[in-house]
């Protein structure tokens, strides 16, 4: 009987079980690789969609930047027209500063003169 058992485990039945086990192993390995490849493919698809969305967003930024460039150039040309006026304002400001200094000196002189006049009226020459 022991010899019969050995023959069963080594015979065609054992080979079928081995073949079936190997087939299951290869099927499982194939399914695992397929799911890994599918996951990678899904990630690549998502990345492609994200890149397209970012490209659209940056295209909009490019349009805005072009508009801003034109606006800045217009402002530069307009500000160039004001350079003459700015120079005139600077000259006027300098003249006003000098005028304030003269007024301050005149104010001191008038105060001294007023003090002398008051002193003279309070102490008439005898």
Image (cartoon, grey):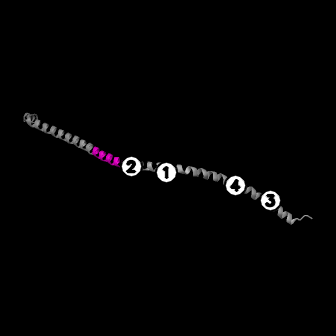
According to the picture, the residue beneath numbered tag 1 turns out to be: 75
Mark 3 vs 1: CB contact within 8 A? no
Query: From the viewer's perspective, is the residue at label 3 or at label 1 nearer?
Result: 1
Give the image quarter of residue 36. Answer: top left
Mark 4 vs 3: CB contact within 8 A? no
Measured in 3D between alpha carbons, the distance from the residue under mark 3 to the one under mark 1, in whole angstroms, is 54 Å
Q: Could you tell which of marks 4 and 2 lies nearer the N-terminus?
A: 2
For label 2, the SS is helix
Measured in 3D between alpha carbons, the distance from the residue under mark 4 to the one under mark 3, in whole angstroms, is 20 Å
According to the picture, the residue beneath numbered tag 2 turns out to be: 63
Q: Could you tell which of marks 2 and 3 lies nearer the N-terminus?
A: 2
Measured in 3D between alpha carbons, the distance from the residue under mark 4 to the one under mark 2, in whole angstroms, is 52 Å
Q: Image point 81% across, 60% down: which residue?
A: 113
**Segment colored magenta:** 43-63
- Residue 2, image x, y percentages: 9, 35
For label 4, the SS is helix
Q: Image point 9% across, 37% down: which residue?
A: 13
According to the picture, the residue beneath numbered tag 4 turns out to be: 99
The front one of 61 and 90 is: 90
According to the picture, the residue beneath numbered tag 3 turns out to be: 112
The C terminus lies in which quarter of the figure?
bottom right
Q: Image point 28% across, 45% down: which residue?
A: 43
Is residue 120 shown above or below 57?
below
């Amino acid at each position: 009987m022991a010899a019969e058992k050995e023959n069963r485990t080594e015979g065609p039945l054992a080979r079928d079980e081995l073949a079936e086990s190997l087939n299951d192993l290869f099927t499982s390995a194939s399914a695992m690789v397929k799911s890994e490849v599918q996951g990678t493919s899904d990630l690549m698809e998502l990345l492609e969609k994200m890149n397209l969305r970012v490209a659209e967003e940056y295209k909009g930024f490019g349009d805005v930047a072009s508009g801003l460039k034109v606006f800045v150039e217009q402002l530069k040309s307009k500000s160039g027209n004001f350079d003459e006026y700015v120079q005139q304002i600077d000259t006027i400001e300098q003249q006003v500063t000098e005028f304030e200094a003269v007024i301050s000196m005149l104010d001191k002189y008038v105060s001294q003169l007023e003090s002398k006049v008051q002193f003279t009226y309070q102490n008439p020459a005898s």
